[in-house]
Image: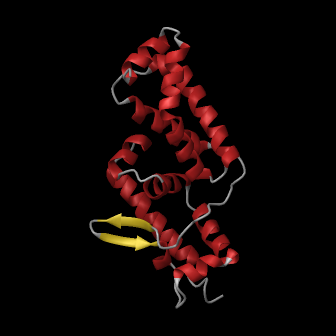
């Protein structure tokens, strides 16, 4: 199995098979990030195509200063953030999934919601799920991308900072602000 750098050099020389190997090596990751961000197969496929078109065009400019995967995920992040098609809603499987962790403190989506009912019972209500999805969709693009990469894709803050080309502190701020915005958006929903 050839390493990324060898495949990049071959692809630059016109070897389409080498480019296809790079594409297949990372295609699931790109699709997963796109799907997590948009929650639509069609949108994820559109983002996927745009990402690999940009990679194909930009490969000649890749300077090996970072890992190919970091460069690829940075492109994926930028395409997701700039994607302007109709907003689709996220479907959450569980309200008990951790949405923010920092130095031992953990916040679950169910913690953001006031009320006496259990989170699993609330998730059964499709109306309630719509409120949660709507709240997630209100996040600014940068916060939503950081949130998606962290809590849907499982990347570490440092990795997200590399992908989004910003400081780790900025990513932590995006995540903190996202959780606070979700908390505010979902405040009192159960009592309505």
Horizontally, residue 85 falls left or right of residue 184, namely: right
Residue 83 in the image, given as x and y percentages of width and height:
63, 43
Residue 130 in the image, given as x and y percentages of width and height:
67, 71
Horizontally, residue 165 falls left or right of residue 75, namely: left
Residue 183 visible in rendering? yes
**As drawn, 145 above or below 21:** below
| Residue pictured at 46% horizontal, 78% vertical | 111
| Residue pictured at 57% horizontal, 39% vertical | 79
Residue 181 in the image, given as x and y percentages of width and height:
51, 69
Residue 118 in the image, given as x and y percentages of width and height:
52, 85
Q: Which residue ends up furthest to the left in the rendered image?
A: 103
User: Where, quadrant-wise, is the N terminus in this rendering?
Assistant: top left
User: Where, quadrant-wise, is the C terminus in this rendering?
Assistant: bottom right
Q: Which residue ends up furthest to the top in the rendered image?
A: 13
**As drawn, 34 above or below 25:** below
| Residue pictured at 35% horizontal, 52% vertical | 157
Quadrant of the rendered image containing residue 133: bottom right
| Residue pictured at 48% horizontal, 34% vertical | 26
> Which one is in front, 30 or 182?
30
> Which one is in front, 130 or 172?
130
Quadrant of the rendered image containing residue 166: top left
> Which one is in front, 170 or 61?
61
**As drawn, 155 above or below 24:** below
């Amino acid at each position: 199995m050839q390493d990324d750098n060898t495949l990049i050099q071959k692809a630059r020389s016109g070897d389409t098979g080498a480019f296809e190997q790079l594409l297949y090596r990372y295609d699931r990751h790109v699709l997963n990030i796109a799907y997590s961000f948009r929650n639509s197969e069609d949108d994820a496929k559109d983002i996927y195509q745009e990402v690999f078109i940009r990679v194909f065009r930009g490969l000649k400019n890749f300077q090996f200063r970072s890992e190919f995967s970091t460069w690829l995920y940075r492109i994926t992040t930028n395409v997701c953030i700039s994607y302007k098609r109709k907003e689709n809603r996220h479907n959450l499987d569980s309200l008990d999934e951790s949405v923010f962790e920092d130095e031992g403190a953990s916040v679950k989506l169910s913690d953001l919601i006031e009320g006496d009912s259990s989170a699993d019972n609330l998730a059964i209500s499709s109306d309630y799920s719509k409120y949660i999805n709507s709240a997630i969709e209100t996040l600014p693009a940068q916060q939503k991308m950081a949130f998606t990469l962290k809590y849907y894709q499982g990347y570490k803050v440092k990795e997200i900072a590399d992908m989004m080309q910003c400081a780790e502190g900025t990513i932590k701020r995006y995540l903190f602000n996202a959780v606070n915005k979700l908390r505010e958006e979902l405040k009192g929903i159960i009592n309505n």
